[in-house]
Amino acid sequence: MVDTDHILLEKDGDVARVWLNRPHKKNAVTPELLYRLDEIIAEVDADPNLKVLVLRGVNNTFCSGFDLDILLKDYVGSTNAMDVAVLSAKVCDRLYSMNTPSVAVLEGYVTAGGFELMISCDFAIAVDDAKIGDFHIRRALFGGAGPIYRLPRMIGIRKTKELMLTGKLLSGIEAADFDLINASAPADKLDQTVEDFIAQLTDKSPFMMKLTKMTIDRGLDADIQSLMVMEHLAVGNALQSEDGREGVTAFLEKREPKWVGR
């Protein structure tokens, strides 16, 4: 386990478990935490043995947002006020765009910057009584790392406006009904729900995981004809890959595939 004051990285077999580690501030984000998360993203993506990143907060709280003491001291009313948004957006976009699939595990408060981290992950699983929402408008602030472009693509314009304009918080159960997360579970079943979910990711070809994730991420950003060309190229890459050959061969030979990641 790699330890800093703000964030922990644990390599557990083929799973990278990343823990936000500021329990005295409900795991509130700092610039240092974001810089370290950026490094972790690069480290995980470069490690062929890691097949999924799980992002979580210590002490049963995910993340309450950017540390408001730091925001007030270093950014509010300052000429570098936009710097915090630029940094947050860059790191969240790297989390969203990384080759390795990511799963956010949501407990306690998942608000503001924590909400932005959550919607930057590929998947999210919450405890039933989590408190999930953008929340910025309650403090007359504006989210700078994804709500206006990630959220509508997930849940549509009307539900996005409902969350962002009211500042309401959803429970895990409500967030699942809102199509904001993948699943919700009681506290005593959360860990097993997470493990069952990530098991569906770690047994797949890393090469095809990367290719499929990359193309899905672009699916709403181009016209259909351009996406068809991208799809054709992806099919060609899959059929020429070693994992593609192994997947077909293993099926025909009625055995489990052995992926090589290319």
Image (spheres, grey):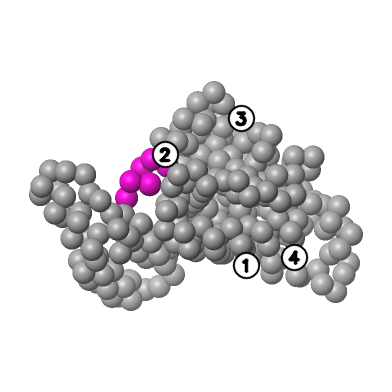
Q: Which residue is drawn at 31% across and 73% down?
A: 230
Residue 107, magenta (yes or no)? no
Q: In the rendering, at what x and y percent does residue 21 appear?
A: 70, 44
Label 1: few (<14), some or many (≥20) within 10 Å?
Answer: some
Disc assigned to residue 197: 2
Against 131, residue 115 (above or below) is below
Q: What residue did someone put label 3 on?
A: 129
Query: What residue do we see at 56% from left, 30% from top?
Result: 128
Circle 3 packing at 10 Å, graded few (<14), some (14-19), many (20+), is: some
Q: Nearer the viewer, mark 2 or mark 4?
A: 2
Q: Residue at x 62, y 67 (%)?
A: 90
Q: How far apart are marks 3 and 4 (CA)?
A: 30 Å
Picture disc at residue 173: none
Residue 207 placement, left or right of 70: left
Q: Which mark is residue 84?
A: 4
| Viewer-nearest of discs 3 and 4 | 4
Q: Where is residue 11 in the image (x, y as percent from the top left)?
A: 52, 47
Which region is colored magenta?
A: 198-204
